[in-house]
Image (cartoon, rainbow, N blue to C red):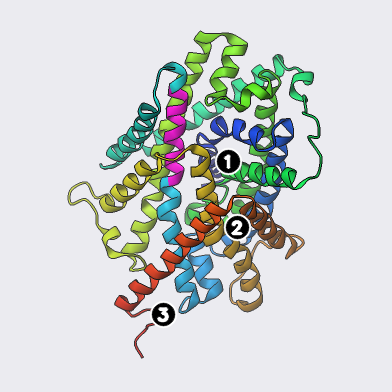
Amino acid sequence: MGLLPAVASNMLSMVGVGPFLTIPLILGAMGGPQGLLGWFFGALISVCDGLVWSELGAAMPDSGGSYDYLQQAFGPKSLGKLMGFLFLWQVMLAGPLTAASGGVGFADYARYLYPRLTTLEHTGLAMAVCIGSTILLYRDIRAVGRISVVLWTGLILAMGVIVWSGATHFSVRRALDFPPGAFHLSPQFFLGLGAGTLISTYDFSGYFNVCLIGGEVEKPASTIPRTILLSITVLAVLYIAMSLSIIGVVPWREAIGSSSIISDFTARVYGPAAARLMTGLILWIAFASVFCVLLGFTRVPYAAAAEGQFFSCFARVHPTRVFPSVSVVVMGVIATVACLFPLDAIIRMLIVTQIVTQFAAQCIAVIVIRRSRPDIKRPFQMPFYPLPALLALAGWMFVLSCSGAAYIVTGLTITLAGVLAYLWRATRVREWPFEAV
């Protein structure tokens, strides 16, 4: 895989259905157009963290991503065992939560076509999307490439229409209608900025996916860093342009209350018939994103279990269709249950869990590897080391502190449960710290 297909695949993984759902949440986080600052800070954190991934991914392109980075940094025969397991542990939640956000988004946009959809029906529809995707995955998949191409085409079409339509109907006065005291540097301002940044990091998340397929990338030492940084830069421009296009047409006070902002935007510009067509396109993107997310994430615990690094039950495959049946069912069930929660809660829990068990630890890991693992060659080295890693770590801590006490406690509880699960498994297989003497 060369640079261009790697960038396209990476961007596809990043976008999904996220920006079509979260623009009202970002505006609402700070109560006005100033909420778009969340895009800038989210991009800054993603670039700094992307440099961390770039250095590690170029050094260990065939490793399997964070699982091996954390093991190599903290000791492949000691603490690194636990850190690698915690990465796998959070994948079991991160994958279903990401899929659930797509399911809830599907139901939100379906409500535009069927306004009488009750809360119970809305939840049921979101769960049905996850169940349907799981059923589709419960078979031998041979058309994944074609599905990805169709999804990518739909994404580009939708984003292109939005940006073009907004540019041709743009009102500067409407877009820059800041409320009084919008930039007053109060505690509430920074809490809102943190909340908006958390949501934007959800939309940028996925820039590291190229690291997970590093063994299939041509010239990984240069292609991986370029792919990560190009993906973030291009999408940062598109996200900001799309957000400005929308609030330049739909007043932000109306946009905040919208659960199907792209449909409302299209209706304002082209009328209800065009809005229905755009809604249908978003529904397809949402369903396909759920399918693709579960397809990718279900393979992670399976591969680890097949190598003896995770619970053995996840290594089971279907007897005739040869796919990871247990992993597909377990993640599908968790995703379906997660649809009971609102979109904002799903996004917060997803990002908090990843920060606690993966992102923060990896910022430390790149520094540890530089200092204690001279045997690991680093063909790409982040500029201004260690500043990007420290800025990324500080950014993640800022986002974490603004996510809400309940989510922080839940994230720490999930991590503690992962530690206990690792220790229980380690006693059975005699691994660190219970290895046989």
Asked which secondary structure carries label 3, the reply is loop
> In the drawing, what numbered circle is on residue 53?
2
**In this figure, which residue is indicated by the disc labeled 3?**
432
28 vs 327, left or right, is: right
Image point (45%, 60%), residue name? 414
389 vs 16, left or right, is: right
The answer for how far apart the CA atoms under marks 3 and 2 are is 27 Å
Examine the rendered structure and indicate whether residue 304 appears above or below residue 111. below
Mark 2 residue type: Trp
Looking at the rendering, the stretch of residues picked out in magenta corresponds to: 97-110
Image point (34%, 87%), residue name? 436
Is 236 contained in the magenta span? no
> In the drawing, what numbered circle is on residue 91?
none
Does residue 230 show up?
A: no
Does residue 204 show up?
A: yes
Mark 1 residue type: Asp
Q: Residue 304, percent across and down?
A: 37, 62
Q: Which badge, 1 or 2, is on the more N-terminal residue?
A: 2
Examine the rendered structure and indicate whether residue 182 appears above or below residue 46. above
* Towards the viewer: 42 or 416: 416
Mark 3 or 2: in front is: 3
Mark 1 or 2: in front is: 1
Q: Which badge, 3 or 2, is on the more N-terminal residue?
A: 2
Is 109 contained in the magenta span? yes
Principal secondary structure, stretch drawn in magenta = helix
The answer for how far apart the CA atoms under marks 1 and 2 are is 17 Å
Asked which secondary structure carries label 1, the reply is helix
* Towards the viewer: 307 or 267: 267
Among the 4 quarters of the image, the one containing residue 291: top left
Q: Residue 173, percent across and down?
A: 79, 19
Mark 3 residue type: Trp
**In this figure, which residue is indicated by the disc labeled 1?**
203
